[in-house]
Image (cartoon, coloured by chain):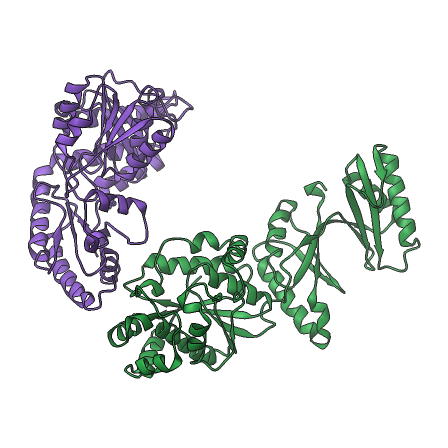
Chain colours: A green, B purple
Amino acid sequence: MAANRINTILLRYGEVFLKGNNRSFFESMLVRAIKKSLDGIEYKFIKERGRYFVEEFASDDAPEIISRLKKVFGLHSLSSALKVKSSIEEISQAAADISPKSGTFRVSVKRADKRFPLRSMDIAAQVGGYMLFQAPNLKVDLFNFDFELNIDLRDNGYSYLFYEKIICAGGLPAGTGGKAVLLLSGGIDSPVAAYQMAKRGLKIAAVHYHSYPYTSELALQKVLDIAAKLKPYIPDIEVYIVPFTQIQYAIHEHCPAEYMITIMRRFMMRIAERFARQNEALALITGESLGQVASQTIESISVTDSVVNMPVFRPLIGSDKEEIITTAKRIDTFDISIRPYEDCCTVFLPKNPVIRPKIKDAEHYESKLNISELIDEAFANIKQAEI
Amino acid sequence: MIYFDNAATTAASEKTASTLAYYAREKFFNPSARYRKGIEVKNDLESARRKLLILLRGEGNIIFTAGGTESDNLAMFGTRKRRGAEIIISAAEHSAIYASAMELKQQGYNILICPTDRAGRVDEAEFSRLVSINTALISILHINNETGAINDIGKLCHIAKSINPKVVFHSDGVQAVGKITVNLQAMGVDLYSISAHKIHGVKGAGALFVKKGVGLAPRLFGGGQEGGLRSSTENTGGIISLANAAEDCISNLTARTQRVAQIKEYLLGTLSQIDGFLPISDENSSYFILTFSLPKVRGEVMQHALEKRDMLIGTGSACSSGKAEKRIADALMLQDSYRDGIVRLSFSGENTLDEAKVFAEEFIKIYEELEKYGGK
């Protein structure tokens, strides 16, 4: 369809339908997310049963609107459409105008407006007939067609003509699944974990552990840049910076080097949990993938898990690195994640971290540390970052 | 703020700022225009060109570019050389030369890399062994941007030309102009790169000196500015402030150098008391750069810690980043424990001895604090 003829974007939502009594809540969250994503663009939003329409925008803005809406969780698909008055003459004329002039095609009609005098099959036949009359090189083929013209005859007196469905992000609208705290490192995995859990409707507050002066301003900027890339998908994402150096010093000083990472991870989990409880979040999210590195063996995970008392979501636990990278590239965080700045985990990195740590040992080594004091101190200095 | 990263860039001078504003708002006309106002701007450009040639004692032409990197690229790619010819560069060249050389290697040229000593200075004996009748182009930086080592370009150029009179000799003088006396005729170089923002000019302006009789082919095509060698409407404010900045720096070179030398001497004397301090800049290096390495704390970590106290410095080596840093550490033959501990302090005439005193005290305090934890 000629771009300048697009005057409507037709939106379909998916799972929201399934949610019975909660439907109005889910819908209101979805509408909010849609409107937020289109911030700064002029348009009119129309809500109808089973469909939303974005209309009255400048036709040059259509590609930008589509690209933004594709990232809104809760939307199933969209189509760029031409809206015309529901009369057989107008529909036929518009169909002939916007369609290719040669090739094979079919016309599919959905008639929601039962007052309309013609039935679906008859509308398809009449519109198709008119198209053939206007463009003799066209040929109808119901099964092997080059393009399919869809006509959506709504009960508002208008019909929408479109060709293809663009699949959107799917999932559930932002914020409908409650809130969780993400451990965001700046690496490849944690942004993907955030994306996947946000897809299930979670609102996300991210904590990032910063080891000044061992990690740089550029490392911090990297995390903020990642968060900015996640924003189209997770409009309400927040990032909090937790100073971590003093804790690392204490572990470095009092615990054996091979337990450095294990105990560090336990501190990270404790801080994240406490932060979650203070901020009405009910779960933690990490980007761990089983066996990827020493701290992600089943033993390591059970040792780090044992310090928290809330669900820890690890959406990537069963994913290969390649799969994670594919998603990271799709959501555009990959290129930022591979910037070469250190994160706090690479500071004081022992040559041989323990691969199968034991809870008993970790607890023993930690007994030399004043855990609550260290956490209090880190907590007192948490800062929210602007994205 | 104490700013000791002047080899990265300098603050533009007030004069630069006002020159830029003047050529942006008032004398903004296109120097190629045929009306009087355009011709006046063209005349200003030509005076800037003449001024630079006189200041640097060059006999030939100045091609204005967008900076040191572009000048280096024009020199490397613009010189005529037969396919497969040999090109000599030093192991410690700036990335603009090194990466250009690697590209020329891809294109089928034979790149020979001349080793340096531990201070980053070209090994002259090795250099003379590398030059041959097959050498088409040589590029040796005048002052090493990482270590401040000064290459004796006049001597190297003489060696090269006496072995092969046809060789084209280029030198990157970005860290040299305004920091030591530069006499292009005395050195005998064919091509010489200059940048404005290292001497209180502005980013985005530079020049390539081309000795009379040296052939060069353009890299940018278009309106035919700069004698057809560098098409693009001239960055008039940048170019004119480059000439002014060079004039200011060169005219008070002695006084400025003395002040900066005091700063360097003080810092070297004080910081060398740190246990394990390894000087990289040697006694013959530029007064404007002091590079050293520390065994127990990474240079990058010192940089971050100093930044919190409003003191900005450069580092030679970010352990995980930057291929260039690894290449330079290799060229300087640094032992493992010193490879990522490189710190580069670089000065300008605007720095003071008082700043150096405050800095040294703070630096030592931070180092002593951090070395306890290692973290390397």
Residue B107 vs residue A53, the one in the foreground? B107
Residue B312 vs residue A296, the one in the foreground? A296
As displayed, is residue A48 above or below residue B289?
below
Q: Where is residue B39 shown, x and y percent of the image?
A: 33, 22
Residue B83 vs residue B279, the one in the foreground? B83
Residue at point 45% right, 80% down? A308
Q: Where is residue A50 shown, x and y percent of the image?
A: 75, 64
Q: In which quarter of the image is the N terminus of chain A?
A: top right
As displayed, is residue A22 above or below residue A192?
below
- Whether residue B368 is visible, yes or no, is yes
Residue A46 vs residue B326: left or right?
right
User: Residue A268 sits in which quadrant?
Assistant: bottom left
Q: Where is residue B226 shown, x and y percent of the image?
A: 33, 23
User: Residue A33 sits in which quadrant?
Assistant: bottom right
Residue A181 vs residue B315: left or right?
right
As displayed, is residue B78 above or below residue A40?
above
- Whether residue B67 is visible, yes or no, is no
Residue at point 70% right, 73% down? A19
Residue at point 31% right, 32% down? B101
As displayed, is residue A382 above or below residue A56?
below
